[in-house]
Amino acid sequence: MLAATTQAFAVSPRQLVEIADFSSPVVSPDGAYVAFRVTRASIERDIYDTAWYIQRVDGSSPAQRVSDGGVPLRDSAGVALPATVVWSPDGHWIYYRARLDGRIDVWRASVDDTAAERMTSGGADVRNFVLSDDGKVLKYSVGPTREEVAAAEQAEYDRGIRVDRSTPLGQPLFRSGYIEGRPTTQRLGFMFNRVDLTADVPDRWKVVDLASGVVRNLAPSERLPAALAASDLAKQVPHVWKLARDRKSGRIALLTRTGVRTDRLRIGLAMLPARDARHLVKCVAEACIGKRISGVQWRPGTDEVIFTVTPYDQGFAQSIYRWNVETGAVHLVATSSGLFGGEERWESGTCGASSKVLACVTANANRPPRLERVDLQTGARQVLFDPNKALAQDLARIPTQLLRWTDAKGRTFTGQFYSARGSGNTPPPLFVTYYWCTGFVRGGAGDEWPLATMAEQGISTLCINAPSFSPNADKRYSMGQSAVESVVHLLASEGRIDKSKVGMGGLSFGSEVTMWTLIHSDVIAASSVASPTPSSMYYLLGSNIGKSFWSVLRSNWQLGAPDETPAHWQQISPTLNLGKIRAPILMQFPEQEYMFALGYAIPMMLNNRADVYVFPNEPHNKFQPRHKLAVYARNLDWFRFWLQGYENPDPAKAEQYARWRSMRSSMRQRHIVQQGAP
């Protein structure tokens, strides 16, 4: 049963959980239609509803639901996998992979909504598929059968699971995590990336004739040509990062990237006339030089490359340009205050392209995702489909702005700021989260803090973008600390926040920066973390992986074994700095990671300084709808309690507040004792 609530919200945590998210749209071969998938969480049923839609690109008719999209597929970290769709050459069908009725198959749906049908059969889930250029043949790959996977998992369960270097220590070991929509027994891939138990079983490719329905095994001589990869061009072009091949001419648009492991990132845009060509055509226009170019694709049937610029100093607000590779001319198409590729992933998605228009999922700080048409010549924009319109109207009541500021060293930071409502003449508290704040921010990186709701309830909120990721851990963390301290000083000096009431939270790198700031600064009054920080327990469990773990630990954190680099462990590890952490901490960990934090979580919990929760079957990024709502609600209650002294009158939360009041009393008493100590 879901707990009742007596609070009224202009923007509720539930609204933020149940927003509609889009896949990257794909335009039909004739440019007339666009296909996309919409995903929406259901708190009541604790599932995600997905559906594929098709709409005319000119907006002359509303979006038409053509089929069920199935259970959203995710990677082992909980991040949604791209929902890819392929159009038939005649534009009559869309093909896609979906988990429906407990199995993953290739399905197709008709543009006129007269049919949605399964195109593959057999006892194994489909891993990949390719539609032939003429649309007559579907090739698809499968792994072991579902029965074989279940039998392998059950056999381990019955005889006991042997621990080796691939065992994901620190989590339950039998069907304890989701991969591609199914609870699976997991193994470790690289580092802590999880794969299913039978991931090393090679693909078997099959072919289905779409006219007759006849299925056969793919002959060795019919092996699919490998897609062009950056490594294939390494001899001609070093440092290739992203590429896009024009299917008609064979020309290759590409982005090169250097300085990734330093503070000086350099990205170049160029075109290779053919795969084996030696002459590289570079974009030398001002719009291409020194810009943070994030995406590239061909404008169908033209000599133009469409590229997206995502500058940090604009809070990663995107602009779209087109570059003519023959004349060298570059033209601005459109600008935004957020994303044109607003897919809900760590990296933004792409727009669907025709020769005349783009179909883009747009989103910004106070505008949830919607589908727009962008004219490639004029830049004119038209809304095609907006399932989040009501939420957008509610969000419009909360003032938002992109903040830019510098610290004492002159380093520039940006962040999305939501101003508290109803604070009167008293400066409101501030909550900050650090890491990644693009598009519709909702809950910051990891989506754990309902930023708009907190602002509506009287706490200003700020999501800070990390400007760079130095390979040196101390520099990364110190930069995050400086970003927080400098913006608190700025906002307090302007009378916009109360600097004695600042909360902070984060996931992954954001959690690490939060813990570092708690240890090395006194700016934070209350905190919340969603991920562990490197500690002795993290080292113990991770060391079972062996050389790859030790190598990454050394390169990313400059850490060896605790007795090998004790000074640096002392700088980073919360376990070794418990006495320096003075703010209360709410820890809401996924079950796959919580054991990494026990070395410091248990002492702080027993010392009445931390409240700890673990969410079953959750990976790095929690995704189950009721868990998302519970995390949102508890973070809201937590910061309202510590920063505003407010307690939700819901009787179901009485025990929670009794525990927090006890924590507050203990911490006040401890502060008095420390103040009086000689």
Image: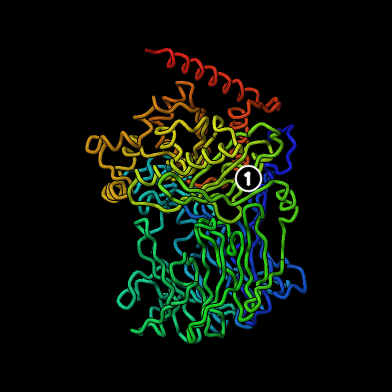
Hey, which quadrant is residue 223 in on the image? bottom left
- Residue depicted at 42% across the width and 51% down the height: 194
Q: Measuring from the top left, give residue 548's x and y in whole percent.
A: 29, 51
Q: Measuring from the top left, give residue 358's x and y in whole percent.
A: 62, 73
Q: Measuring from the top left, give residue 72's x and y in whole percent.
A: 58, 56
- Residue depicted at 41% across the width and 24% down the height: 603
The C terminus lies in quadrant: top left
Camera-nearest residue between 98 and 464: 464
Camera-nearest residue between 386 and 39: 386
The N terminus lies in quadrant: top right
Horizontal side, residue 207 vs residue 220: left or right: right
Which kind of residue does numbered mark 1 sit on?
Answer: Tyr
Look at the picture and state if 73 lies above or below 130.
Answer: above
User: Alpha-carbon neighbours of circle 1 within 10 Å: few (<14), some, or many (≥20)?
Assistant: many
The answer to whether one can see residue 446 in this image is: no
Q: Residue farthest to the left?
A: 564
